[in-house]
Image (cartoon, grey):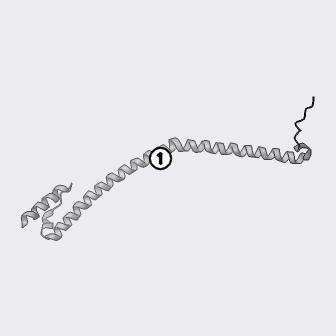
Amino acid sequence: MLDWYNTALFFLSEAASDPVNFGILAQYGLLGFVAAGAIVFGRVSYKREIERADRLETEVTRLNNLIIERAIPALTSAAQAADNATRLLQNMQRVQEMDMMRGPASRQQPTGGDDR
């Protein structure tokens, strides 16, 4: 009966990167076995999450560099285009106001007649 228990403890101790004192846990039987499993699971999960966090941090750095290289210049040129469009609209409004001040005669377009 203790043979399967010792085998299970051996595999659990091999799975852990830092060996746990399973002798103390062995005194508690099944409760010790569950506790050992929880310890191994915690260590494996912690290691996996650390690796995942490192991988995601690298990805965030790559995406930030991509934003700096591509998005910021595009936004700058878009802002310049909006500024140019605003100036053009202001000029058009100014011309329209001047035409209105001159009166209706200045708004009439010449007819397409021949003046020869």
Residue 16 as seen in the image, left or right of residue 71: left
Of residues 33 and 101, the one drawn nearer to the viewer in this rendering? 101
- Name the outermost residue toward the front: 113
Whether residue 75 is visible here, answered yes or no, is: yes
Rate crowding at label 1 as few (under 14), some (14 to 19) or many (20 or more) other CA atoms within 10 Å: few
Label 1 element class? helix
Q: Is residue 67 left or right of residue 92?
A: left
Q: Residue furthest top?
A: 116
Residue type, numbered disc 1: Asn
x and y percentages locating residue 59 in the rendered image:
41, 48
Q: Is residue 14 above or below residue 86?
A: below
Question: Residue at 10% across / 60% down in the picture?
Answer: 7
What percent of the width, then of the height, locates residue 8?
A: 13, 61
Is 93 left or right of 112, judged from the image as shown?
left
Identity of the residue drawn at 24% across and 61% down: 41
24 with respect to 98 (left or right): left
Residue 40 drawn above or below residue 65:
below
The residue carrying mark 1 is: 64
For this rendering, which residue is in front, 89 or 24? Answer: 89
On the image, which quarter does residue 47 sit in?
bottom left
Q: Is residue 26 above or below residue 94?
A: below
Q: Tell me residue 11's x, y (percent).
A: 15, 58
**Which residue: 76% across, 46% down?**
90
Total labels drawn: 1
Residue 103 visible at all: no
In which quadrant is the C terminus drawn?
Answer: top right
Residue at (6% x, 67% y) in the render: 1
Percent coordinates x, y for residue 102 in the rendering: 90, 45
